[in-house]
Amino acid sequence: MKQSESQDQTQFALEGPLYEQPVAKQQPLASELTDKKSLDKNKWKKIVFFSLGFFLVLIILSILWVWSRPDSPSDGNVLIKDEPIDKIISGPLEQRVYELSQELELADPNHEKLPFPPVDMRISFD
Amino acid sequence: MILINNFFLAVIIFFSLMARSGQVLAQEEPAIQDSKMVFETQSFSQDIRQLTLQYRGELEEYRKAEQEYNILKQQYQQLGTLVSLEKAVRATQEAMVVRARVLQTYVRLLRFYLLSQAGIELPQKQVAEQNLLDTLSKIEQHQQELIEPLDKLQMRQVVFDFQELSMVIEESVYRVFSLLAVGKLQTVHDKAIVLKEDMKDQLATAGGALKLAERQRSFDETDRVLNSLKSSFDKAEAVFVDSHRISYKGVYKSNNNQLSLIYSSLSKALVFLGELLKI
């Protein structure tokens, strides 16, 4: 039986790291770096194209909205053709009826617009 | 990078064009409203606005003068001293001066309202205007009497004279009130008839035969309401014209019931016209 080998596990644990093989850190290769750059570039391109597409859709929708407005002077006649006849006729007439009703409210005989001045007509010294 | 720049440039141009077109549309609408306003209002609108502001200011000034007059008069009644007498006389005179100023501005303002009101017979309008001008000169005369400092006896005389003048002022004012009340309703009546005729012309071809018959019945009913008002207006004006011996204040109050009936009938006619558009 060989007695030279130590059986102390604590000492073995302390010396353990000395026997470990050092692992050399691998440096990134030049080709890997170029790949990463190209990936970043692709990512930016995607963002730009997505935002470009989004804005284009937005612009198209805006143009459609402007054209479809009923009070647009450029295509007003076309829109009027689509409306029912009664609606076109009654528009200004309804407005006149409304205005006349407002005028009638002002003509209420129980409401004087400029009443007699609230002054004491009997001011006297006595 | 150039692509992005171009894109943003395009976006900026697009939105600036949008904003410009919006501005153009927004500028067009008030122009229409302005022309409409010019058509509807008379040339007296500027005078009325200016005099209304002046009237409000003078009325405020009068309230302060009247308050001071009441306080100093009360003080004199309590103290009975010469100093309090002098102060009370001055305060009374001041209140009367400011009151005369208020009445002058009010009569001027009322004259412009009368002149700008349509629907009044021209001879009646001219007589009422002349009456207002006479009243105005009488108020100015009364104000002249108050320029010099007055003693207690002189003050009493001015107060006595003003009692008569106040009745003249009231009569002139109520005469104009009566004319204005009739004129306003007459204007609405005339406009309602014109509107009804326009509606008849424009709605003649709309809808089918069934609607046409229904609409004709509605027009007939509206005609009946509007035509019945002619006699009501005649009655209201007859009371006013024959009121040589009656006070205009009395005429104004007695006419009020008649005018209220006209008002409710006109309101009914306008509701009918509104309903007619929905047939």
Image (tube, coloured by chain):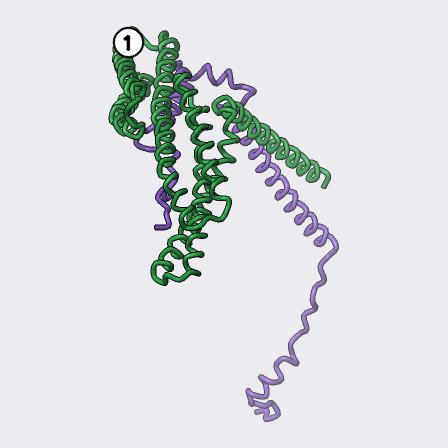
Query: Where is B58 relative to B200, above or below?
Result: below
Of residues B12 and B83, which is closer to you in this image? B83
From the top left corner, tell me how far across and down residue B155 is, in percent: 41, 46
Mark 1 is surrounded, within 10 Å at the Cα level, by few (under 14), some (14 to 19) or many (20 or more) other residues, namely: some
Most foreground residue, A108 or B243 = B243
Q: Which chain is purple?
A: A
Please state, as top left, top right, bottom left or bottom right, where the N terminus of chain B lies in the image: top right
Instruction: State which chain is coloured green.
Output: B
In the rendered structure, the answer to whether residue A119 lies left or right of residue B42 reads left
Q: Is residue B24 left or right of residue B239?
A: right
In which image quadrant can residue B219 be found?
top left
Question: Is residue B184 or residue B98 the one in the foreground?
Answer: B98
The residue shown at (28%, 9%) is B216
The chain that hosts pointer 1 is: B
Q: Looking at the picture, how far across and down is residue A32, in whole percent? A: 70, 54
Q: List the residue tagged with mark 1.
A: B216
| Element under disc 1 | helix
Where does the image place residue A109, in percent across and percent down from the top left?
31, 29
All told, the count of numbered labels is 1
Which residue is the extreme one toward the bottom? A3
Above or below B76: residue B261 = above
Instruction: Using the image as rendered, state which of residue A30 and residue A39 is in the foreground.
Output: A39
Q: Report if residue B70 is visible in the image.
A: yes
Residue A68 visible in the shown view: no
- Residue type, numbered disc 1: Gln
| Vertical side of B259 occupied by B93: above or below | below
Q: Quadrant of residue A59?
A: top right
The quarter of the picture where the C terminus of chain B appears is top left
Residue B122 x/y as whole percent: 42, 17
Q: Residue at x 47, y 41 (%)?
A: B145
- Which picture quadrant has residue A17? bottom right
- Residue at the front extreme, as displayed: B153
